[in-house]
Amino acid sequence: AQSVTQLGSHVSVSEGALVLLRCNYSSSVPPYLFWYVQYPNQGLQLLLKYTTGATLVKGINGFEAEFKKSETSFHLTKPSAHMSDAAEYFCAVSPTNTGNQFYFGTGTSLTVIP
Amino acid sequence: GAGVSQSPSNKVTEKGKDVELRCDPISGHTALYWYRQRLGQGLEFLIYFQGNSAPDKSGLPSDRFSAERTGESVSTLTIQRTQQEDSAVYLCASSAKVGRDTQYFGPGTRLTVL
């Protein structure tokens, strides 16, 4: 079965500092990869996704993620944190060979310190 | 345009009662997913509908859980004889087409079983 690991359930960064949220997956075949964000009192929304092609994917609000097959990782980064980035971030994978299920990580809560 | 809506937003019930949760997907979206999110945990896949195909029920945790969808419209998730461990936020998502398309999430239904 697929598994998605998000290291660090809580991450705190200072405003203007680099944001790095980690995601690793277990799969013998590279899956499709997603990052979703959940702002307080709002539903989940897609930040970015990787399906095929360029391994560095750019998303909304200045976020980007790089698919590294050798490391089975899809870490999310943003060069400079903003107060509005405070939210819960979820990494998700969808296997390319076993139907249309999605598997989500347990989430990382990002706090931005002024 | 209108997003995914869910009702009720909150539901408190007594152990042993049946509950029905409703999801209205985005118009024209062929795929619909149900997830469960327990406190402090990630999203747990429950069931997936795709057009008129047989649903993928592999994530349903027990036979107390069932879901229906009529065509490409409303879906209902029914939990019979609720237990305290069923307490969670139940999320619905829809996507436009087959495959690993972006999922659009509803705000969720928070179920509390006393």
Image: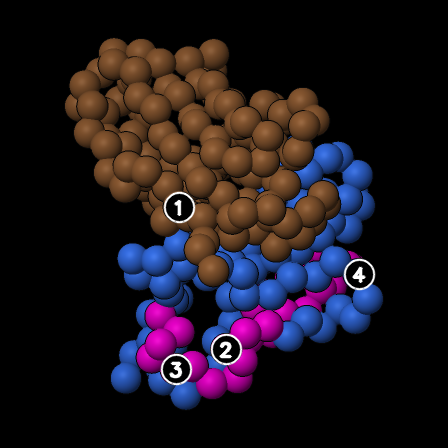
Which mark identifies residue A49? none
The residue beneath circle 2 is A61
| Cα distance between the residues tagged 1 and 4 | 31 Å
Both marks 4 and 2 on one chain: yes
Provide the chain ID for the residue under circle 2.
Answer: A
Question: Between residues B50 and B109, which one lies in front from this camera angle?
Answer: B50
Question: Between residues B17 and A92, which one lies in front from this camera angle?
Answer: B17
The residue beneath circle 4 is A52
Work out whether mark 3 precedes mark 4 in sequence or the reverse, and give the earlier one.
4
Amino acid marked by disc 1: Ser
Provide the chain ID for the residue under circle 1.
Answer: B
Work out whether mark 4 precedes mark 2 in sequence or the reverse, and give the earlier one.
4
- Please say if A48 is above or below A16: above
Which of the two marks, 3 or 2, is nearer to us in this view? 2
Describe residue B53's horizontal placement relative to residue B40 as left or right.
right
| Cα distance between the residues tagged 3 and 2 | 10 Å
| Cα distance between the residues tagged 2 and 1 | 25 Å
Residue drawn at x 25%, y 14% as measured from the top left: B17
Give the blue chain's letter.
Answer: A
Residue drawn at x 47%, y 60% as measured from the top left: B1
| Cα distance between the residues tagged 4 and 2 | 22 Å
Can residue A38 be seen? yes
**What shade has chain B been given?**
brown
> Looking at the figure, which quarter contains the C terminus of chain A?
bottom left
Describe residue A36's horizontal placement relative to residue B22 as left or right.
right
Proximity of marks 3 and 4: CB atoms separated by less than 8 Å: no
Q: Secondary structure at mark 3?
A: loop
Question: Between residues A86 and B97, which one lies in front from this camera angle?
Answer: B97
